Amino acid sequence: MAIVGGLVDVPFENKVEFDDLARFAVQDYNQKNDSSLEFKKVLNVKQQIVAGIMYYITFEATEGGNKKEYEAKILLRKWEDLKKVVGFKLVGDDSTKPGGIINVPNPNKTEFQELARFAIQDYNKKQNAHLEFVENLNVKEQVVAGTMYYITLAATDAGKKKIYEAKIWVKEWEDFKKVVEFKLIGDDNAKFGGIISVPFPNRPEFQDLARFAIQDYNKKENAHLEFVENLNVKEQVVAGMMYYITLAATEAGNKNIYETKIWVKEWEDFKRVVEFKLVGDDGAKTGGIIIVPNPNRPEFQELARFAVQDYNNTQNAHLEFVENLNVKEQLVSGMMYYITLAATDAGNKKEYEAKIWVKEWEDFKKVIDFKLVGNDSAKIIGGFTEIPFPNSPEFQALTRFAIHQYNKNQNAHLEFVENLNVKKQVVAGMLYYITFAATDGGKIKIYESKIWVKVWENFKKVVEFKLVGDDSAKPGGIINVPFRNNPEFQDLARFAVQDYNKKENAHLEFVEVLNVKEQVVVGMMYYITLVATDAGYKKIYKTKIWVKEWENFKEVQEFKQIVYATK
C-alpha cells in the first residue's frame, strides 16, 4: 500500500461497497444539479483517516451517452451513520480549489439559505441592524472539526441591496452553529490574521467594555480616568473573544488616547483586562509579556509570598519576603506572572525570580520556577530547568512511582536508593527527567525516568524508563518500548487488527507483536509492528494507534502490510 500524506491506495476490484459509494455520489450530484449521470465503473480508490474515513473515488460515468471520468470525495462516519459527498468534479475540472475548500453547487438549496438567514439574524442581533436576506450567490465548504461554510450572499440594508460574506462553523453531531465572521464585501475593516475591525465602535456593548477597562485601571493604579468615547474596536476569536479597543479618556481634564485589550468568555461570565496603556507608552513589551506597573500592589505581593512559601516547603528553607522589584505578566491558558523579588536568607538580602501560573476561574495557582538571580544552578536549555535538591520528598515520590510502575510492568524488583539529578520542562503539564540510583538484585545501577504530570487532572504517567547507557530510546520523541508483548500492547495490536477487519471486511488473525515504539503527542501515539495470518498465510503489518487515556479514546491512524510470508 502506498501512503502519500495520509492517503492510502485501496484495492477496489470486485468490491461492491465502492461501487455503492460511487453510485451514492452520482445520485447526490444528479439531485443537486438536476443532472442525469449514469455510473459505469470504479477506476481508483484512496482513503484517508480523518474524523472518520475520507474516500477519494475516481470512476467512469456517462452523460448523454458520452463517457467521462469523475472524482468524488466521500466522508464516512459509521458510528454516526453519516455519509456525505464532500467533493465531486469532472477530472481536469479546477472548480475544486486546493486547501480543502470546495465549491458547492446550488448555493440556494434550503439548507444553505437557512445558514445564510442564521448568519443575518446573528448579525442583526449583535449590531442592532435590519438586514433582510435576498439570495445566496456562492457557497464553499471545508471539513474542519465539523464543517466551515463560506457563504457569499445578497441582503438589503434600508432597501439597498448589498453583498456580504459569512463564515459559519457547524458541528452537526453537537447541534452546534456559530457565525465566525460576517462582513460587507469591499469593506476593508476586516483585516487578515484573525483580528477583525468592528463597525460602530460606540455601540453600548463596546462602551461598557471600555468603561470596565477604565474602572479596572483606576482601581489598580489609584487613577481617575473618565471615559469619553471609543475610537476603534477590533475583535479576535481566541478561547473566547479578545477585544482591542482604542479609546479617549480624560485625566484631570486632559484628554489622552489609550489602548486596552480585554479577554471575554461569555459562557463563563469571564472578563479580564489583559493590557491597558497610554498610546505611545512602551511599558508593554512585545512577545506577549507585559511589564506591570506598581509591582508591590497587594495582589502581586501575595503571589510573591505564595512562591516563597512554596519554595520554603519544598526545599526546607527559611526565606522571608521583603518586596517585589519587578512584575511581568503573559496571557497563556490563564496568566503567567514573572516576579523578581527580594527576600532574606539567614538575614542576608538576596534577589530571586519566580514564575507563577494562575487560572483564576479554577482557583489554580502553581509555582513553575523559583531561582536565585545570578545562580547558575537553574540552567535553562530549550525549556529544561535544573532543579536544586533532587531528593526533595516530592521528587523521591515521583521516582518511587516510576519504579513501582516499572516493577509491575516488567515483573522486576528494583529498590529506590536516591535521586541524582532532576530536570523539568513545561509541556501540557510538567515533564520531569529524573536520573536516580536503584538496586537490582542487590547491585546499585543508574536509571533515567521521564514522568509526565498534570497536577490539575491528578494525572501521572511514566513516559520512559531505562538503564543509563541503554540505547533503546531513540531521539525525535519516538521511543522504543521494551517488553513488546506486555498485555497492553497485545491488546492495542488486537484492537488495530479488529478495526482493519471491520473496515476492509477482512479476516486477519493476530499472532504476535514484533516491535513497539511510543511518542508523546496530545496523548500517546503507538507504532506497532505485528504478525497476523491472512487465510493461513503469515504476514507482517505496521499500525499507528492514537490513545488518549483520559478521554478513553483509541483510534487506528494507519494499518498497512509491509512483508508477505509463507505458511
Image (cartoon, rainbow, N blue to C red):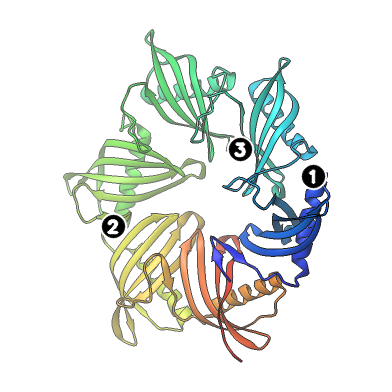
Q: Nearer the viewer, mark 1 or mark 2?
A: 1
User: Around disc 3, counting alpha carbons within 10 Å, would you say few (fewer than 14), some (14 to 19), or many (20 or more)?
Assistant: few
Separation of marks 1 and 2 at Cα, in angstroms: 70 Å
Which residue is located at x 32 percent, y 43 percent? 305
Q: Are marks 3 and 1 in contact (CB under 8 Å)?
A: no
- Amino acid identity at mark 3: Trp
**Residue placed furthest toward the top:** 253
Which residue is located at x 63 percent, y 76 percent? 497
Horizontal side, residue 202 vs residue 226: left or right = right
Q: Secondary structure at mark 2?
A: helix
Question: Mark 3 highlights which residue?
Answer: 267
Look at the image and tell me in which quarter the N terminus lies: bottom right
On the image, which quarter does residue 541 sit in? bottom right
- Can you tell which mark lies on residue 315? 2
Where is 146 relative to 43, above or below?
above
Q: Nearer the viewer, mark 3 or mark 1?
A: 1
- Amino acid identity at mark 1: Lys
